[in-house]
Image (tube, grey):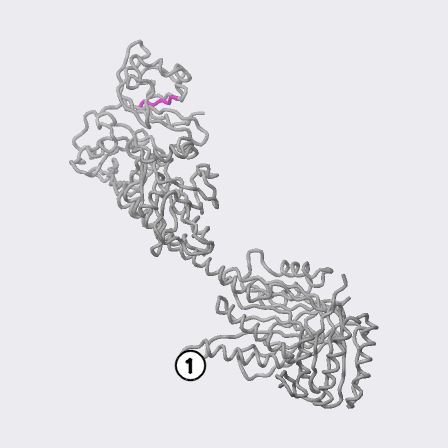
Amino acid sequence: MSPVYPFDDAATARAVIADDGTLAEWNAGAERLLGWSAADVVGRPAAHLLAGEGWDGDGVPEGPRWDGILTLRHADGGTVSVWLLAHRKPPEDGNPGHWFLVTPLEGDGPHSPDDPLERAQLVQSPCALAIYDERLRLRRMNEAMAELLGLPEERVRGLRVPELSGRPQSTDIERHLRRVLTTGRGHDVRTYLPIGDDGRTAAWLARMAPITDSAGRVRGVCVTAHDFTDQYRARERLQIVNEASVRIGTTLDVGTTAQELADVCVPALADFVSVDLLDPPEPGGEPRTGPLTSPVGLRRAAHRSVTPGHHEAVVEPGHVDVYPASSPQADSLLAGHTIVASLATDDLADWLSWDKARTERVGEYGIHSTMSVPIQARGLTLGVAVLTRYRRPDPFTPDDVLLAEEVTARAAVCIDNARRYSRERETALALQRSLLPRSLPRTAAVEAASRYLPAAQAGVGGDWFDVIPLSGMRVAMVVGDVVGHGVQASATMGRLRTAVRTLADIDLAPDELLTHLDDLVVRLSVETGNEGRPGEVGATCLYAVYDPVSRRCTLARAGHPPPVMLRPGGWPEQVDLPGGPPLGLGGLPFESAELELPEGTLLSLYTDGLIESRDRDVDASHALLCDALGAASHSLEETCDRVLHALLPQGGVADDVALLLARTRGLPPSQVATWHIPADPALVAPIRKQVVEQLATWGLSEASFTAELVVSELVTNAIRYGAHPIRLRLIHDATTLICEVSDTSHTAPHLRRAKTWDEGGRGLLLVAQLTQRWGSRHTADGKTIWAEIGLLEEE
């Protein structure tokens, strides 16, 4: 179906020729000119009306417009020589392509001297000027306008703007002319129109003013056209640069930044843009610093096309391709500056002869020009951006080169920043992973599982967790959070974790341990300060010690969220635990609480990143945590995943998250034996005998010899140097036998080097050689000396 034109005016002869050469439209003016009615000619070949040769004597013309004189057949049998203006209309919105033909029928006859349109003077000016009458038909135009239109004035008088131009924008221009004609007020219109047949475009400012007679009536419209293409393109380039400064570098991800560079350049500068980057010599290392040599291996980081699917691309993002010396990519990288190449000058011939895949794409899409811009920042070459044109017919200009270099330079700094950030982030994450436990120890006291998630933006932080085996089958569980993010917070976390392990090794009570840790944070704050002022180092911590023999747990916290507890057969509940001040305030006391935990009790220790969210309050987060913990699941690993899924968003967390789950175990009384030791050294032998008998009952006779020696030394030392009452306790599980001797003295033993003729001083040295480890811990009543003996596991 051909488009419908307003054929209600017989002042011009107009016709439409379909692509198959038949006449599709015929107006009254055409009938007036040749005598044929629409019924006579519509649907018949237009060539039947030709009395002589066709357009230019060479069939259908090429290009968007044609004008010339044709000899046409009149209905009365004669011929008429007619000047025709033909506009080529391409297929659009489902309508087929066609030719629109027009010629004026009313010449430039005599006019009254008082005609205001005649009195409007057309000067020889570089400014293009035209005058339209009350019917918006061309009356006069100067030489500049005739040259701009490429049509002689004497041929086009009487035509309207759509008939003159044939472009879609001409309808809007005529609408503005009518507005000036009806309102009597001037109007300015800016438009961007192609000029000539080579595809070049220009920006125009059309200034429209009414022409009035002596009575003040509007009799026509004067139009002047001003070419402001240079200013328009300068503003367009500035807009692209501004857009690049806003759109490029929104993240610190190399791939995203490269994609943003490609997105900005399409379609503003090119029809297809690829961004290829050099891989560093070593993974995670610095970019290459020396001169490059060909061939060059580049990894595709991003590309963008004006056509969906990016079918022009030969390489997909993430893949590496090798470019020879004849390629635009390698040439620009080796030269260190932008290189523009085109098919018209055979600049791409050598490369395309080497790369058949690209040769096929060039022929398929009609690629005619490329521009390769090195991506350079801080003296380093990071890669190359290649801009390609095939839909835009014009080649790259020097202004295009300057613009591409400006945009690429901005992107290069962002890509370099992203590379540096990625490298530093990986280093920081590796540091943090080295500071956190890679796996949790297997203990007889608890079964444990953990999760750690760094903040999505900061990357690393100061959250940590730990499970620390203690003497007497006990275990310490700790979760902490250093204020802030980054390497500094991670390093502080490592120091605090080491300090907690050291303090736990001397078996300090939880509240006492937090007091020592508070002193350390205060000192760290002073060390990080400037000019004698304290820094801003702070932390929170929760420390718990569980004894599987007594099944009691002692906890203390320093400004940290309290744990959530789930007893067997119950519902999760928050442990009522004194808050305590955050670490780093100094001088404030900490309080501990003691709980009796049935075997199978689940403890959930976590940092505030798990429960603090912008989308809900802390109470709602606690409710979600309890629901996730309360769902039946034997696996702690599954429970960890369920908790994170219930409380954390899918796109990453705003703060670090540490989660430690521990299910308590109880040591049955049958695995514990206790004796009260009299003060008589002569009774040590019967005690050794009872120990051997107890080990035989437990089936641990293979450890009897070592245990007998260790018990003898520890009990003898307690009788000689300790204070009564004295107690001996044996505890065992599948892998370890523990000997403990307690007394009411607070004096701790220590190893010493015995001289050759000394009669004593070798007891503890012997214990240290025979056992896996030994030590002492202070109790409320005195001290306990303990030693661990490894047991051979049954095959």
357 lies left or right of 703: left
Front residue of 671/241: it is 671
Residue marked by disc 1: 532
Residue 607: where, in percent of width, then height?
59, 68
Q: Nearer the viewer, residue 566 or 219?
A: 566
What residue sits 80% from the left and 78% below the top? 691
Residue 449: give x, y in percent of width and height: 66, 63
Which residue occupies 40% across, 22% down? 19
Q: Quadrant of residue 598?
A: bottom right
Which segment is the magenta one?
11-17
Which of these two is toward me, 602 or 731? 731
Give amino acid for label 1.
Gly
Q: Locate residue 766: give its quadrant.
A: bottom right
In magenta segment, residue 473 = no
Q: Quadrant of the N terminus?
A: top left
Where residue 592 appears, as percent x and y from the top left, is 66, 80
Residue 13 magenta: yes
Residue 377 versus residue 689 in the image, above or below = above
| Mark 1 secondary-structure assignment | loop
Q: Relative to 5, does residue 644 appear above or below in the rendering?
A: below
Task: Please identify the residue farthest to the top as the structure is shown.
Answer: 77
| Image spot of residue 309 (x, y percent) | 48, 39
Q: How many marks?
A: 1
Main secondary-structure element of the magenta-colored stretch:
strand
Q: Is residue 473 above or below residue 367?
A: below
